[in-house]
Image (cartoon, rainbow, N blue to C red):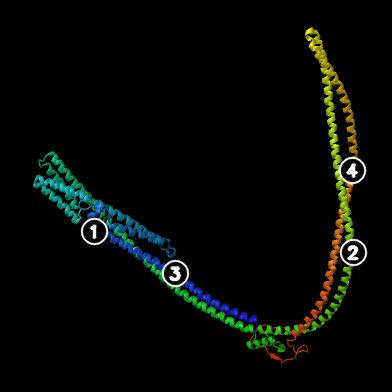
Amino acid sequence: MPQSTIMNIRNRFVILYLIIFFTFSIIGIFTYFSFKRIQNLNNVDKNVHQLYAHALELRILEGDFLRWELFNPEYFKTGKSTYVERFDSTYSTAIELFSALKNNRFSKKIDVNDDLLAIETQLVEYHQSFEQLEKEKRELGFKDWGIEGQMRKAIHSVEEELKQLNMPKLQVHMLMLRRHEKDYLLRRDLSYKDKFSKEQLAFCSSVKQSGLSNSTQDEFLNYLALYKTTFLKLIEKDQFIGESQSHGLLASSHQNISSIILDIDKLSEHISLTTQKNINFIIVFLFIFIVACATISTWIGRYIFQRIIKIMGGEPEEVALIANNIAKGNLQIKFDDTKDYEGVMKSMVTMTRKITGIIQNIYTSSDQVVQASQQFSATSLNISQGAFQQATSIDEIVETVGHISQNISNNAANALETEKITQAVKSSISEIKVQSDLSLETNKTISDKIEMINEIATQTKILALNAAVEAARAGIHGLGFTVIAEEVKRLAENSNMAAGEIIKLTHSSLVESENVSKLISGIIEPIQKSTQLVHQISEASQEQHYGAQQIVSTIHGLYQLSQENASASEEMASNTVELEEQINSLKDMVAYFNIGDNYAYKGQAISIKAHKNKKKKNSKKPTNNE
């Protein structure tokens, strides 16, 4: 069976296996996340049950506080209660559970956040009512603390006064007040409040009529007023708090906690129903999904097997027989030309016929290639001989052009040297001209300065005459000045004569300097022209030198190319011989295949019939290929 068909069949089975694998993977993943969802719902339900337990614990702690802590003197003494602390701790834990439940994404999915918020609001109100209850109870007091303690203190003061006075009528009033007080505390009946007030007024009236001193009466009346005030406050607090869980603050607190417990219970039932619905949905979905995937896998498997049969186009044994014979080199396979082949069988038939045609063409072409290679070898030898002769001629040309290039190079070097000398002479003469011009300017400056000295000598002579005139006027006192004036005059005349001679010499030097400058200017121009000509000769020599080098380089390239052509021709000739050997080797290899002609040996031929496939009525008849 051909490798391509094997791979195709294998890929189809791989696809089937992958579909089954992914089906069970999806089932597993869906089951995992479904159980994860159920677990999260159970966690939510568990937290709700914890809230239920905390709510019950709060109600129990409230009852324990009312039953036990309100009769504990230590609580009123220190203001600290274990039940209150446990109540606050339980409340904080419940609030944290509410926050966790509200932030849980599954709580949002099952839409219980509004219920949680309502229950949390009720819990906050319940906590506030408990704090108010605890505050009111602490203010109400017990025994010696709070309002009850103040009332007991007032009663004790009144009773102490009555013991000292020993007045039975007043003691009767006190006993009646205590009776109304006890009756109210036992029955929580407000009618005893009115009776207490009337008896207190009667008591005060009796005190005023008792004949006691004003100070004693005032003290007694103050105790009675305090007793009445504290008792009325006690009644007011007691009514506000409530005598049972059906009145006052106790009723509100009890109603809140009962409502909280009821709402939590309903919420727990809702979450349980939701969880059960999710479980039922998961079971139904998994059943439908498994049935659908099994159906799809069965259909795909059936399709794959049908495709395999269609791809083979015949019995697998026949396909294997053809492949084995081709592998052994036996191409004498007779196919039924009257039948149509399909699938792999068709490909095997086509391949067999193609290989047979190729082998026949190889045998025919090999002889033609051998003849062409022999002709090509002779031509290569002729080209090789011509290339060697051409290389010899080019070598002689290279030597001649090398001598010419050397002479041009020497001329270029001499021209450059002449140009450098001319440039040096030009520079020296230019420098001499500059110095001559400077000397001319200097002589002009000296001439100007000497004329200035000559003028100074003339002025000095005039001053000497003026001095001699003034000395003559001075008489005998001016004799010394006369001598000095004559001497100055003599010096001025000498200076004037010397200055005149120097001016003549300077003018003569100026004329000679100007002549020298003109002669130098006349020399510079021919030297400059000569320098330009030498420079042009040098550049032309350099260009000739570079041109000769390029010619030499090109001829060297031609020489190298001719050498390479000669070597290539020899190599082509040797390759032609090797090609003949390879062609003979190719014939030996192709001789492995048996095509039943004179080109190779004759072996046993096999016959293959076409596989009959059921065709649809409306399908067109396939055409014969190959």
Q: Quadrant of residue 464?
A: top right
Identify the amino acid type marked 1.
Trp
Q: Nearer the viewer, residue 146 or 130?
A: 146
* Image mark for residue 36: 3
Identify the amino acid type marked 4.
Ile
Instruction: Point out residue 325 in the picture as x, y percentages from the top left corner.
Output: 68, 88
Q: Residue at x 16, y 52 (%)?
A: 180
Q: Which residue is mark 2?
A: 397
Q: Nearer the viewer, mark 1 or mark 2?
A: 2
Residue 361 in view, yes or no: no
Identify the amino acid type marked 2.
Ile
Q: Quadrant of residue 255?
A: bottom left
Q: Quadrant of the N terminus?
A: bottom right
**Considering only vertical position in the picture, is 464 above or below 541?**
above
Q: Residue at x 49, y 77 (%)?
A: 290
**Considering only vertical position in the picture, is 576 above or below 136?**
below
Q: Secondary structure at mark 4?
A: helix
